[in-house]
Image (cartoon, grey):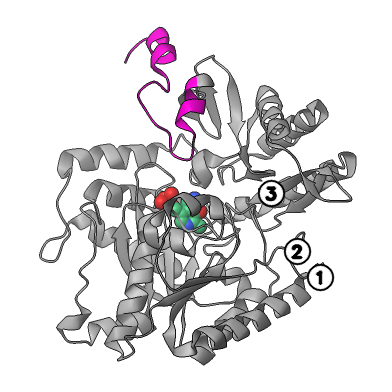
Amino acid sequence: MKDDNFLRENNARHMWHPMGHPGAAMEHPPTVIMGAQGSTITDLDGATVVDAVGGLWCVNLGYSNDKVKEAVAKQLYDLPYYSAFAGTTNPAAIEASYLVREFFAEDGIERVFFTSGGSDSVDTCLRLARQYHRLRGEPNRTKFMSLKKGYHGTHFGGASVNGNNRFRINYEPLLAGCFHLTAPYTYRNPYDETDPARLAQLIAQAAEDEIQFQGPGSIAAFIMEPILGAGGVLVPHETFMPLMRDICDRHGILMIADEVICGFGRTGDWSGSRHWGVKPDLMSAAKGITSGYFPVGAALISGKVAEVFEKSDEAGAIYHGYTYSAHPVGAAAVIACLEETLRLDTKTNAAARGTQLYEGCLKLAEKYDVIGDVRGGHGLMTGLEVVSDPAAKTPMGNDAMQRLHKATYEAGTMVRVGGNNIMMSPPLVITEAEVDSILDALDAGFAAI
Ligand code: PMP
């Protein structure tokens, strides 16, 4: 490993960062994270802070899980790689698929298709949806419906259903036939509707309208996050996803739940869909599947969809997949991570600590009127929307958001800033005292702006 001077001199010189401006990174080099323990991270200057981001909504088990580390190391010696394309497999993949399916059996999931991450999983679900309809004799069902503010990764399929134009505009034209509904975003919506249940109704009505306009027989699938993460932690009313499930059923549209953040305990249950009593046809998963110890994702397939493929002729072959699908080291990480997730019952701590964080944020909002909206209440996914003029709901500007981020970091907590939102998704093993430190650091951050 090179010394600190090398790191400082070469930081941002040769590497372009995802979701960053290449020139800006050269002027303001990124914080170098040197190590991590439990729910804390340590930077090159020696500062240790609570990681309220959980890596990137993913380090559910925290950074010190020896069982996962040992399993990954052992697998590297037993079998570092072999392809899982039709014809070969490996023991870890067999066991990992068994375990993942067990996690989501209650959601109606029967089969697992491994990928290398969330974007892969989303695109896999979109493709499987189209193929499903072809197999059933409806090849014209090719369109996708999704939500504004939704985030579904950055492959062309996922970007096409993404609901934030920041992730779209430079890369257009995207996939044809994708259209977006208003987000269940009570704080701001074109209806000025402040009642979440009524807003759910309005969006469902608009969906019906739009489906008629597009032609019901042209739509392959509707995709949504059970709780919208990167869009600012938008929690739909409990009736919203069931309403959309019903609409999908009536029009023969598949429902895809993007559980990349929500899955594996983050929301206080093993899936986000379960909170709303909905069984999706397909689910995309990643992040918590390995807690970030190895890049793995999965497309999860319900019995209803699986049956159509499995009983079909050769048209049901899946000419889609990744070199690293069912990677043995990734699969070993999945097994160890999910065994630990069950042993530690991380969903229960996520629910308790999530309530503590959410309620603490509500108290902060009483103290600082620049906190326009506090969102969360389902596990460890919490968002704060920051405004410069509370009455007009004017989004706080970027400079102030950066100052807020810096001051919060200096007070001991790493948070994620997206637009005028602060988003938090700490490890699910976080302690009560650490959640208190997050709240203290936020207090100091808001005091500074
Ligand atoms: N879907 C959702 C809901 C996500 O939050 C993300 C990533 N934050 C993705 C898909 C894409 O996952 P990845 O970055 O692993 O490709």
**Residue 192 appears left or right of 272:** right
**Residue 333 appears left or right of 415:** left
Answer whether residue 248 is magenta in the image: no
Residue in the image at 69% along x and 31% along y: 399
Amino acid at pointer 2: Thr
**Tags 3 and 1 touching, CB below 8 Å:** no
Residue in the image at 17% along x and 59% along y: 84
The residue tagged 3 is 383
Q: Is 366 above or below relative to 25? A: below
Using the rendered view, name the quadrant where residue 417 is placed: top right
- Which quadrant of the figure contains the N terminus? top left
Amino acid at pointer 3: Gly
Amino acid at pointer 1: Asp
Mark-to-mark CA distance, 3 and 1: 19 Å
Position in image of residue 160 (x %, y %): 45, 63
The residue tagged 2 is 186
Q: Secondary structure at mark 3?
A: strand
Answer whether residue 5 is magenta in the image: yes
The residue tagged 1 is 195
**Tags 1 and 2 touching, CB below 8 Å:** yes
Badge 3 or badge 1: first in the primary sequence: 1
Residue placed most toward the observer, 62 or 141? 141
Q: Secondary structure at mark 2?
A: loop
Q: Is 384 above or below relative to 274? A: above
Q: Is 446 above or below relative to 300? A: above
Position in image of residue 325 (x %, y %): 25, 56
**Residue 69 appears left or right of 47:** left
Residue in the image at 33% along x and 47% along y: 333
Residue 394: numbered disc: none
The answer, for residue 340, to whether it is visible in the render is no
Badge 1 or badge 2: first in the primary sequence: 2
Bounds of the magenta segment: 1-26
